Image (tube, helix red, strand yellow):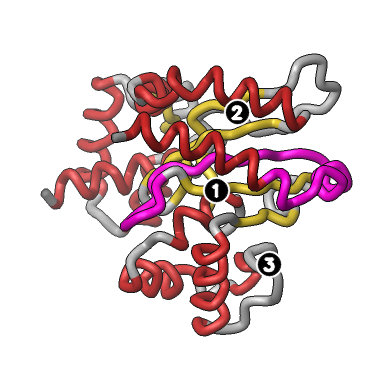
Amino acid sequence: MQSVNKTFEVLEQIAGASEGISLDYLCKLMGYPKTTIHRICKCLCQCGYVRQSDSGKYLLTTKMVTLGYSVINNDALVGVATPFMAELANTTGFTVNLQRRDFDKVLLLTKAEPKNSAFHTNAHPGLASSLLHSACGKVVLSYFSADEQKKYWQSQCHNLNNFKHFGQHAIHDEQDFFKELDLIRSRGYAVDGEGNESGITCIAVPLEKELKASYAISVSGLTPEIHRFGLESLTGHLRRVADILAEKLL
């Protein structure tokens, strides 16, 4: 198991180096023997997950991307949701997003944009977003168990700037964090106040409403237009589609 853990640690370090990373620097960062790191890199190269440039630096290949997209392609809900999302996009005039929990992030499975729309969000299928910086992420996080929420807070509270757009009020401590999660869950929706893209507001509701929420659906649009349409009206449209899709999960 230790060798598997080390392999993924190496992959993550290589992934974080956009211009590649040398064997010596990998060893310096990770503190493992050079022979160990070299053996792992050689194996990853042979399997096609990593390549070595002319300068000797290691870089990721697109094989990891292919594996990631298989997660989306194998999700049966995507095909079922498409027509309902398209209808919602055309009804509201906003982009509709379907996202799913992926460990401590949410993954954008698919999105639908209204016909003849001059405005497009930057989000694309396969995009992973922080649970703190997306409306869908906040909804999913509000359905974590109390223990999971506490662990998540402990992993993030060292940098309160992460919580800048998390709630209606500033998050200063654990009490504020849990209070905001309780509010999100009780009212049944979350709002991303321009946490991902400047000038863009997103509103999300969960598909499941019992013990957990693995899926969430949202609408995204220019902040003034979102406010003009009305929060209550938008959440009503979202809940109608969410209820339909929730039945497809059973």
Q: Which residues are magenta?
A: 208-234
Q: CA distance from mark 2 to mark 1?
A: 19 Å
Q: For the residues carrying marks 2 and 1, which lies nearer the camera in this image?
A: 1
Amino acid carrying mark 2 in the image = His
Q: Which label sits in the foreground, 3 or 1?
A: 1
Q: Residues within 10 Å of mark 1 (few under 14, many from 20)?
A: many
Q: Amino acid at mark 3?
A: Lys
Left or right of residue 94, residue 187 in this image: left
Mark 1, residue position: 205
One can see residue 21 in this view: no
Q: Nearer the viewer, residue 81 or 132?
A: 81
Q: Earlier in the sequence, mark 2 or mark 3?
A: 2
Residue 189's quadrant in the figure?
A: bottom right
Residue at the image position 86 percent from the left and 42 percent from the top: 225
Residue 211 visible in rendering: yes
The label on residue 147 is none
> Is residue 222 covered in magenta?
yes
Task: First in sequence, mark 3 or 1: give its number.
Answer: 3
Amino acid type for the residue under numbered disc 1: Val
Residue at 69 percent of width and 23 percent of height: 113
Dot 2: within a 10 Å radius of its alpha carbon, few (fewer than 14), some, or many (20 or more) residues?
Answer: few
The residue that label 2 is drawn on is: 124
Pick the residue in front: 63 or 19.
63
Q: Secondary structure at mark 3?
A: loop
Task: Classify residue 197 as left or right of residue 217.
Answer: right
Question: Disc 2 versus disc 3: distance between alpha carbons?
Answer: 24 Å
Q: Position of residue 11 (x, y in %)?
A: 35, 40
Extreme-top residue of the structure = 116
In the rendered image, residue 84, in percent from the top left (x then y), is placed at 56, 24
Residue 184: percent from left, percent from top? 55, 64
Q: Which residue is mark 3?
A: 164
Name the N-terminal-most of marks 2 and 1. Answer: 2
